[in-house]
Image (spheres, grey):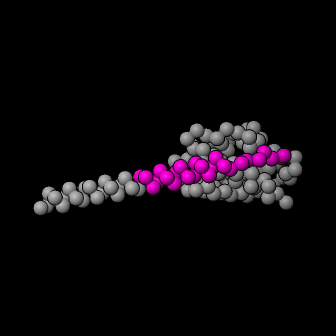
Amino acid sequence: MKNRKVKVFIICFIIFILINLFMFNKVIEEGKALANNISINNMNLKNVKDGIYYGEAKVSLVEVKLSVLVNNHHIKEIKLIKHQNGLGNKANKIINDVVEKQSLNVDVISNASVSSKCILKAIEQALLNVK
C-alpha cells in the first residue's frame, strides 16, 4: 500500500513538472514572437541635446529600465537600472555595441533576442522622449 502511494505521488509530481515546463516554454515562445514584431528605429543623434534620458520597455517576461547619457550628440554611456530577464543576462553586451556604433542598428545577441530587443526599445524610447 505504501509503495503504491509513493508511485502515485511520483507520477503526479512528474505530470506537474511536465505541465509547468510546457507552460514555461509557451510563455518563452510567445515572448520571442512579440520580440520579432518589435521594430527599432535608428535615432538621429544630431537632434539630441546633452543630458541623461530615461527609457523603459517590457516584452513578455523581460523588463528593462535604463538611462542614456548623451554628450555632444554622442551616446557616452548607457546604464541598466533594471533588467528583469529569464536567461538573457548576456544581452547586456548589446549596450556596448550601441555605444560603439552610436546606432540602434546592431545585431541582437544570440540566445538573448527578447532581452536584446527590449534593451534596444528602451534606448529608443529614452531618446524619443527628448525634450
Residue 30 covered by magenta stretch = yes
Quadrant that contains the C terminus: bottom right
Q: Which residue is most to the left?
A: 1
Residue 42 covered by magenta stretch = yes
Identity of the residue drawn at 52% across and 51% down: 28
Identity of the residue drawn at 67% across and 38% down: 107
State the residue in front, 20 or 74.
Answer: 20
Identity of the residue drawn at 49% across and 52% down: 26
Q: Main secondary structure of the magenta part?
A: helix
State the residue in front, 1 or 84.
Answer: 1
Residue 7 occupies which quadrant of the picture?
bottom left
Q: In this view, does 96 lie above or below 1?
A: above
Residue 124 in percent (x, y) is at 74, 51
Identity of the residue drawn at 80% across and 50% down: 70
Residue 37 in percent (x, y) is at 66, 49
Q: Give the range drawn in magenta.
A: 21-45
Residue 106 in percent (x, y) is at 70, 39
